[in-house]
Image: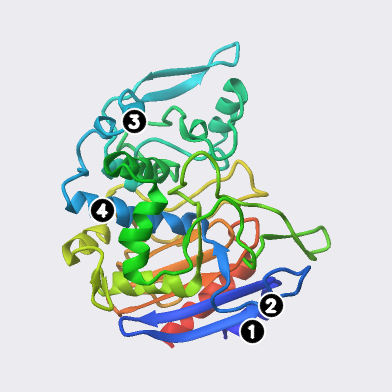
Amino acid sequence: MFEQAFAAANLPGAVGMIVDREGVRHSSVLGVTDIDSKTPMAEDTQFQIASMTKALATVAAMQLVEAGRLALDAPIGDVLPELADPQVLTGFGGDGKPQTRPAARPITLRHLLTHTAGFGYFFIHPELLQYFAAVGMPVPGSIAGISTPLLFDPGDRWEYSVSIDWAGLAVEAVTGSKLGDYMAEHVFAPLGMTGTGFYDALPEGAAKVHVRDESGALKVQPMFLGGGEYHNAGGGLVGTAPDYARFVRAMLRGGELDGQRILSAETVAEMGRNQVAPLRAGFMGSAMPHLAQPYDTLPDQHTGWGLGFLINPETGPDGRSPGSLAWAGIFNSYYWIDPAKGVGGVMMSQLSPFGDKGALDCFGALERMAYG
């Protein structure tokens, strides 16, 4: 099923894995790392996992909540002074300059981890493109790029955003370590994730991002989300499908894998609880459709959001149980975690823009295989 979907999808390459609490049920390795070298894809090929970074960074933040070094509901400005006086964007003056007002309430770590802090993404929200046009476009990978006014008061809405980047900076603030160093010691090493980390450049042999030209033919498009001024907790990791599959298994097992515990079972359960009701989470518009098309994982469901994950309240069309956890990366990589059935899956590819129908069909085939 996965191979047939891949053949119809016009993807350069993909790795798909199905896992349960005990191990790997299935692995498919298809295609090439890039269409120029035609290097065969390998199971341990590295990918830019982009926003699949967010769940791993949330684990790091929740470890510090467990340790009492961060608090979910305290003002995050106590840890990050840059967020101590948040301003909400209200519009633009006749001179084009942004106009703001003080936020109605402080931002908390819970707001950051649930995308309810008020932040946005410039590729999703056109008002942030307008904001940067007025104040100047930031250098890619700079903290200035996430230092924007809020789009709404904290807690009032769900909007996909740079908020996990700030959560990563909070981890750095209380540990005194670079985010990648902390995660390497406390997340990756315990889980045996040997091919995952923050890099200053795309590693040798990693899969390359592709786009389709006007004829539909694939071509390599140099794009790299890492490097820059800080370790981007929202999307900067490079990793492998087997590594991410180990993380999925750890979450299925309540925070433990191979005798190594990264979180308590109670914390994992809280991460899987809908934190944003009655708000609906999951829909993303687009201000830059060549990078990310409008996307809604389950448009017919009132999806929620936990601490790091999308949550479906009803059975998914490809089989996942109610209460499953999921999200994706902008280069068409996807995962889901089904605690009720004890199964999950990971699919990695490197294609832009996000939300590609062929890639989604491959991911759907993988999920149907898991429940078939």
Residue type, numbered disc 4: Met
The numbered disc on residue 4 is: 1
Q: Gap in Å between the C-alphas at discs 4 and 1?
A: 40 Å
Identify the residue shown where x is 56% and y is 67%: 46
- Tell me the element at label 3: loop
Viewer-nearest of labels 4 and 1? 4
Q: Mark 4 points at which residue?
A: 62
Marks 1 and 2: in contact by CB < 8 Å? yes
- Disc nearer the start of the sequence (4/1): 1
- As drawn, 149 above or below 176: above
Residue 8: % across, % down:
69, 77
The numbered disc on residue 153 is: 3
- Tell me the element at label 2: helix
- Tell me the element at label 1: helix
Can residue 337 be seen here? The reply is: no
Viewer-nearest of labels 4 and 2? 4
Say whether residue 235 is left or right of residue 213.
Answer: left
Q: Gap in Å between the C-alphas at discs 4 and 2?
A: 40 Å
Identify the residue shown where x is 82% and y is 58%: 214
Q: Which of 38 and 123 lies nearest the eye of the viewer?
A: 38
Q: Quadrant of residue 342?
A: bottom left
Marks 2 and 4: in contact by CB < 8 Å? no
Marks 3 and 1: in contact by CB < 8 Å? no
Residue type, numbered disc 1: Gln
Which residue is farthest top? 95
Is the residue marked by circle 2 packed among few (<14), some (14-19), or many (20+) residues within 10 Å? few
The numbered disc on residue 8 is: 2
Q: Gap in Å between the C-alphas at discs 3 and 2?
A: 44 Å
* Quarter of the picture holding the N terminus: bottom right
Identify the residue shown where x is 48% and y is 61%: 328
Residue 245: % across, % down:
42, 74
